[in-house]
Image (cartoon, helix red, strand yellow):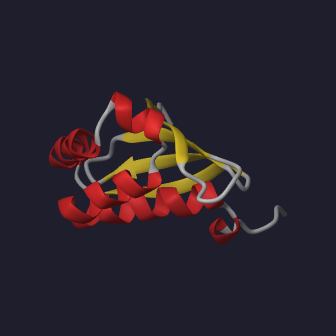
Amino acid sequence: MSEPVNPGKSQAAMRLIAQTTFYNRGDQARLIQFIADAYAPELLEQQPPIAKAAAFAQMRHLLGKTRIKRWIVMNEHDVVARMEAENGTRFVVELKCMDDYPHKIIYFMQHPSSS
């Protein structure tokens, strides 16, 4: 039997959980603030917090709330998680954060999943 997963030991997992929580609540103001605080400047240059939050709002409108179904990979600074939306859509999220405090997110990607 495998060891139980403890997301609290992973900086990346805690950030994915926080982002998913704000997304599911539909709290745009808090999601924008989270993105501004948690994402590395390089990612914010590519997509400012308001634009990223707007993309998440569109995704929530189409898919509904999401939840983490299974942690595929988890270590302190990166995670891969299988997610499922209210409408049944499944996808995989990859999130990596800096090794050093404040552990800003340096990579975030969503991929379709067939299973």
- Left or right of 40 in this view: 27: left
Dividing the picture into quadrants, the one containing residue 28 is: bottom left
Q: Position of residue 78 (x, y in %)?
A: 65, 46
Asked if residue 3 shows in the view, the reply is yes
Asked if residue 109 shows in the view, the reply is no
The residue positioned 84% from the left and 63% from the top of the image is 1
- Left or right of 16 in this view: 53: left
Q: How many marks?
A: 0
Q: Position of residue 25 (x, y in %)?
A: 24, 67
- Left or right of 76 in this view: 21: left
Q: Position of residue 112 (x, y in %)?
A: 43, 30
- Left or right of 49 in this view: 84: right
The residue positioned 28% from the left and 45% from the top of the image is 49
Q: Is residue 67 above or below residue 49?
A: below
The residue positioned 69% from the left and 53% from the top of the image is 100
Residue at the right extreme, as displayed: 1
Depth order, front residue of 2/62: 62
